[in-house]
Image (cartoon, rainbow, N blue to C red):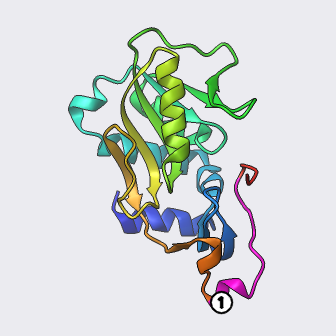
Amino acid sequence: MTEEEVLAEFRASKALLEGHFLLSSGRHSAHYLQCARVLMNPARAARLAVAIAANLPHDIRKQIDKVVSPAMGGVIIGQEMGRALQVDAMFVERPTGTFELRRGFSLEPGDKVLMVEDVVTTGLSSREAIKAIEEAGGQVIAAASLVDRSAGSVDLGVPFFPLVALNFPTYAPDELPAELAASPAIKPGSRAQA
């Protein structure tokens, strides 16, 4: 799937939003990718997961025992990645502020895991999810996402395979351009702002 084909999927589902958005990283942007919308159609979600799986190097793909994603945003794409790779998929969540496996999910010691996110911006959630997976006995051999918004700068400590890299500018609260500063920020994501 080409970058333009991926963007066409986002546009078709009205998942590429324009306005003034407060990202979960605390940064501001004039663009927001609402991955929940692009993934709400099962056929579209499956197509995107198959494209991510095809983007993984064969030697990594054949080693994957489990897919783990961070809740909330990564749950749907994680499930679809499990289907595409024909392995179990589960998720970590933050009931008390720190990612952990719950709901009876567990990893066997040494399970080789693909950590899957919807969007990576700073990589903080991804690194926290990887830490939780490793603490649960898994070995994260790679990470993948629908979108890399880091401008290629994110380091997750493992090979990272985004389906598409979109480099919309983001701004710290004290460096907002006038057009963003003139309107209130909308917080469209699932995570409360710290």
In this rendering, would 184 be left or right of 8? right
Q: Is label 1 in a helix, a strand or a loop?
A: helix
At a point 35% along the width and 24% down the height, the residue shown is 64
At a point 60% along the width and 57% down the height, the residue shown is 25
Expressed as whole percent of the image width and height from the top left, the position of residue 97 reads 71, 35
Q: Looking at the picture, tell me which residue is in the foreground, 130 or 107.
A: 130
Q: Which residue is mark 1?
A: 179
Residue 88: tell me if it is visible: no
Q: Amino acid at mark 1?
A: Glu
Expressed as whole percent of the image width and height from the top left, the position of residue 105 reads 61, 16
On the rendered image, what quadrant is the N terminus found in?
bottom left
Query: Does 179 lie within the magenta span?
Result: yes
Query: Does 142 lie within the magenta span?
Result: no
At a point 46% along the width and 9% down the height, the residue shown is 108
Residue 94: tell me if it is visible: yes
Expressed as whole percent of the image width and height from the top left, the position of residue 115 reads 46, 34
Q: Which residues are magenta?
A: 178-189
Q: Looking at the picture, tell me which residue is in the foreground, 187 or 73.
A: 187
Expressed as whole percent of the image width and height from the top left, the position of residue 32 reads 61, 67
Q: Mainly helix, strand or loop, the magenta region?
A: loop
Report the residue that reaches farthest toward the top.
109
Q: Looking at the picture, tell me which residue is in the foreground, 77 or 40.
A: 77
Report the residue that reaches farthest toward the front.
174
At a point 50% along the width and 24% down the height, the residue shown is 133
In this rendering, would 134 be left or right of 35? left
Circle 1 crowding by C-alpha within 10 Å: few under 14, some 14–19, many from 20: few
Q: Is residue 8 above or below residue 132?
A: below
Residue 4, picture quadrant: bottom left
Q: Is residue 174 above or below residue 54?
A: below
Residue 63, picture quadrant: top left
Report the residue that reaches farthest toward the left.
59
